[in-house]
Image: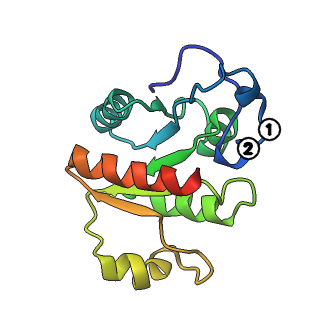
Amino acid sequence: MHEPARDVPARGAADRQGGSWLETAKPGAQMPSRIMVIDDEPDVRLYLLTALEDAGHEGCAPNVDETVEEAIARLRPDLISLDILMPKRSGIAIYRMLRSSDRFRRIPVVIVSGMLLGKDVLDDGFRELVHDDRIPPPDGYVQKPVDLKILSQVVSELLRKEA
């Protein structure tokens, strides 16, 4: 999977105030947002990572030998792009874990999926998909095949909310 070749300081939207990565940045310099892509299709994952990096973000993805939880804890993404339909572990199970975890629940999640989810499903029916009324709907949704302009708009909007 695609990931930065160097070790990076742990950071995330939740620790932007007083995080050590901020102290080492040059005055006025803005660190790129780190966006994790969780998708089982290597071509789609690479496409999304490349598009996000071209837009000025830092793309990352879990290594093949680690769990999603381990990757998120290690890489501390500012936002997660998550596919729903995956063979080994469903995106629904991953989303449920993210929103149930005190550690990860504040990370914005954009569902990027070929599964057609209309606004009514995202607003009202998503809790039925996750089988838990306490789990809120995702922060954003982008339909596959991905329109990069829409992806960029959704990502930018969510990152602005987090700033």
The quadrant of the rendering that contains the N terminus is: top left
Q: Residues within 10 Å of mark 1 (few under 14, many from 20)?
A: few
Q: Position of residue 3 (x, y in %)?
A: 50, 24
Q: Which residue sits at x=75%, y=43%? A: 17
Q: Alpha-carbon distance for marks 1 and 2?
A: 7 Å
Q: Which mark is residue 15?
A: 2
Dot 1 falls on a residue whose secondary structure is: loop
Q: Which residue sits at x=38%, y=42%? A: 40
Circle nearer the viewer, 1 or 2: 1
Q: Position of residue 38 (x, y in %)?
A: 45, 44
Residue 6 is at least partly visible in this image: yes
Image quarter for residue 54? top left
- Residue type, mark 2 in image: Asp
Specify the farthest residue to the front. Answer: 28
Q: Residues within 10 Å of mark 2 (few under 14, many from 20)?
A: some
Image quarter for residue 100? bottom right
Left/right placement of residue 104 relative to residue 115 reads right
Residue 87 is at least partly visible in this image: no
Q: Position of residue 22 (x, y in %)?
A: 71, 30
- Residue type, mark 1 in image: Gly
In the depicted structure, whether residue 83 falls above or below residue 117: above
Q: Which residue sits at x=54%, y=79%? A: 131
Q: Which residue sits at x=40%, y=30%? A: 56
Q: Work out whether residue 158 or residue 44 is closer to the camera in this orientation and state it.
A: 158
Q: Which mark is residue 150?
A: none
- Residue under label 1, please give it: 18
Q: Work out whether residue 119 or residue 72 is closer to the camera in this orientation and state it.
A: 119
Cβ atoms under marks 1 and 2 closer than 8 Å = yes
Dot 2 falls on a residue whose secondary structure is: helix
In the depicted structure, whether residue 9 falls above or below residue 98: above
Q: Position of residue 11 (x, y in %)?
A: 69, 36
